[in-house]
Amino acid sequence: MKGFPNYLVALALMALACSIVSAYDPAPLQDFCVALNTTADAVFVNGKFCKDPKLVTANDFFFPGLNTPRSTTSQLGSNVTLLDVSKIPGLNTLGVSLARIDFAPYGLNPPHTHPRATEILVVVEGTLYVGFVTSNPDNRLITKTLYPGDVFVFPIGLIHFQFNVGKTNAVSFSGLSSQNPGLIVIAKNVFGANPPINPDVLIKAFQLEKNVVDDLQKKFAA
Ligand SMILES: *[C@@H]1O[C@H](CO)[C@@H](O)[C@H](O)[C@H]1NC(C)=O
Ligand SMILES: *[C@@H]1O[C@H](CO)[C@@H](O)[C@H](O)[C@H]1NC(C)=O
């Protein structure tokens, strides 16, 4: 960096660091900003309407009953309970959320990504085979079998999954680094797009026969 004053280099590095940080939820500029649907009794902060802080109560930061098992009778045998800003308005601007996932024996949380959050998961019951795949061109699978007490991280944006490989139910909890992590379920989003993606696109992209694509589009249609 010959010829550049050190402070300019430092400034450039700081700007880079800030732009990386603000790629996710922006840092809050106040203690909290409890989300409101309406503008009545509201103040406008960071692009959101917030409840007047004087009217905020403990319940704005509260959600009960996450210890209760969820039904896992769905086709996939899993059930995600996500506590994001739509469930806990006090999460607005704070950059975190929490999920409970219940798995029937051999239940699957299928390959998906969170466009806005890294996830850190802890298994409290059962045995989960989990993994994520790195970006092109490596497409490397990073995988592990987890037992109660084991923790695993799924980096932001990467395709990942959790599969109950045990003969009993499994339960895990995840922290996510966004108030609204976003969810893209690969099979559902691609084959269940609404309106449907032209089958020729999927035939070519996935190297499948037309009847297979038709079948998948029927299965994943809303
Ligand atoms: C906002 O609207 C949703 C859906 O209409 C409702 O379930 C929720 O309780 C509302 N939240 C607030 C803070 O009023
Ligand atoms: C998840 O569990 C809840 C409570 O048991 C149930 O109401 C809901 O329908 C379940 N969702 C799925 C996708 O199975």
Image: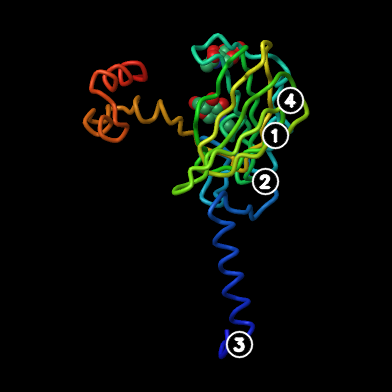
Q: Residue at point 52% right, 38% down?
A: 114
In the image, what residue type sits under mark 2?
Phe
Tag 1 secondary structure: helix
Q: Residue at point 29% right, 19% down?
A: 212
The residue nearer to you, when weighing 164 against 23, is 164
Tag 3 secondary structure: loop
In the image, what residue type sits under mark 1?
Phe
Precedes in sequence: disc 4 or disc 3 = 3
Alpha carbons under labels 3 and 1: distance apart: 47 Å
Position of residue 146 measured from the top left corner of the image (x, y, whole percent): 70, 28
- In the picture of the structure, the residue carrying the numbered disc 2 is 32
Mark 1 and mark 3 in contact (Cβ < 8 Å)?
no
Residue positioned most to the right: 149
Comparing marks 2 and 3, which lies closer to the viewer?
3
Alpha carbons under labels 4 and 3: distance apart: 53 Å
Position of residue 52 measured from the top left corner of the image (x, y, whole percent): 63, 43
Residue positioned most to the bottom: 3
Precedes in sequence: disc 4 or disc 2 = 2
| Mark 4 Cβ and ligand 2 under 8 Å apart | no
- In the picture of the structure, the residue carrying the numbered disc 3 is 5
Ligand 2: quadrant of the figure: top right
- In the picture of the structure, the residue carrying the numbered disc 4 is 147
Precedes in sequence: disc 4 or disc 1 = 1
Position of residue 86 measured from the top left corner of the image (x, y, whole percent): 56, 32
Q: Quadrant of the N terminus?
A: bottom right
Alpha carbons under labels 1 and 2: distance apart: 10 Å
Is 68 rendered above or below residue 55? above
